[in-house]
Amino acid sequence: MFFNLGGPATTDQAGQQGPLSAARQLSLSQREEEILVLSSQGLTDRQIAIELDIRPGTINTHWSRIRLKLGASTRSQAVAILLRAQAEEETRQLRKERESLLKQLDERTQAEQSLGAIAKVASAALRALPVVLWAAEESGAPVLLEGKPAEDLGILADTAEAKAEFVRSLAKEEDFQRALDGRVCVSEGAFGDRRFESHLAPWTGETGQRRVVGLSLDATFAKAAQDALLASLKLLTSIVDASPSVIHVHDADEMREVFVNRRVFYTLGYSPKEIYDLGSNITMSLVHPDDVERLQTVKQRVLELQDGEVLPVQYRMRRANGEYALVSDQVTVLSRHADGRVKTVLGVAQVSHPAPTGPLP
């Protein structure tokens, strides 16, 4: 059979899909469609009967029905009606394809515009942020170099050799090699007085050549700020240790000292190792037995302190020689939890000895 309407079209059938699709719009039966399409292709009734394996007389009966349904007086008019329907169908298909292409073009244009906008934002960010975006060949020669630090240093307007030298300085040679070998890694580099933290990743070029792409943060100012902070902390530690008072920080949740300055060694006579061996709750380890209850009451009062309020406390602590010293402590809230509960308490204590032997006021 020439037609296989229930399955996909074969190579021979593919050429019939246009006429057949047009014929189906004419409200004909399947057999009438087949006869009309074959006739439009120039086959005689005899050839059509052979092709469809039916009797010639049956062909004439189908033609009568075809002309009646199409309002055609002759077979030629019926074929012309089919060809006109085919042309209209092809026009509709072309219009659909045109609309689809226009839609794809519009979507592509929008995507390109969006990509262009993203590129502009990325370019603006690279000009404003302390980062360098770069990519380099295996030799270290840059194929991409953008970013404010490179612009500030005049690298972008410099020679190719200067650009290559700058890119090679952004990461250690062994880390650059790791990235060439396919590994993502973090490296450090320096160019003059600038310090960089670089994130490296492998990148294969269009022709398969090995490359490295990197994003390098200018950490110079962050490093300077870190150094300044460490210097400030060192100065603060020196001041605290030089204070004639014992300065301590107590964690109200864990009920332990989280910081005590070095003055405690001199006032109580213990070595650092002996203080360490006493554990984190130094006060309760050394407090006079008669003052334990006093300190328990004080701890409850500390939890009720307002910010800026100072609570004076006196208690006695055992010195390394076995004698007791009088501790006059001034405590205040140092920090709180988000719900307002006291988290840490700061204490500044004066230590004098010997301590009174009777009950404290």
Image (tube, helix red, strand yellow):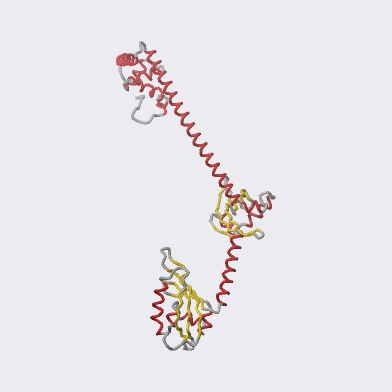
Q: Is residue 191 above or below residue 118?
A: below
Viewer-proximal residue among 84 and 158: 158
Which x, y percent locates residue 130? 60, 54
Number of labels in the image equals 0
Residue at the extreme front of the image, as rendered? 361
Q: Is residue 206 above or below residue 95?
A: below
Viewer-proximal residue among 67 and 190: 190
Q: Is residue 152 left or right of residue 52?
A: right
Examine the image and state in which quarter residue 313 appears. bottom left
Let me know if residue 100 appears in the view.
yes
Viewer-proximal residue among 315 and 50: 315
Which x, y percent locates residue 240? 55, 75
Residue at the extreme top of the image, as rendered? 73
Which x, y percent locates residue 227? 60, 66
The image quadrant where one finds the N terminus is: top left
The residue at 53%/42% (across/down) is 115
Let me know if residue 270 appears in the view.
no
Examine the image and state in which quarter residue 72 appears. top left
The residue at 46%/85% (across/down) is 318
Which x, y percent locates residue 338? 43, 63
The image quadrant where one finds the C terminus is: bottom left
Q: Is residue 36 above or below residue 296?
A: above
The residue at 47%/84% (across/down) is 326
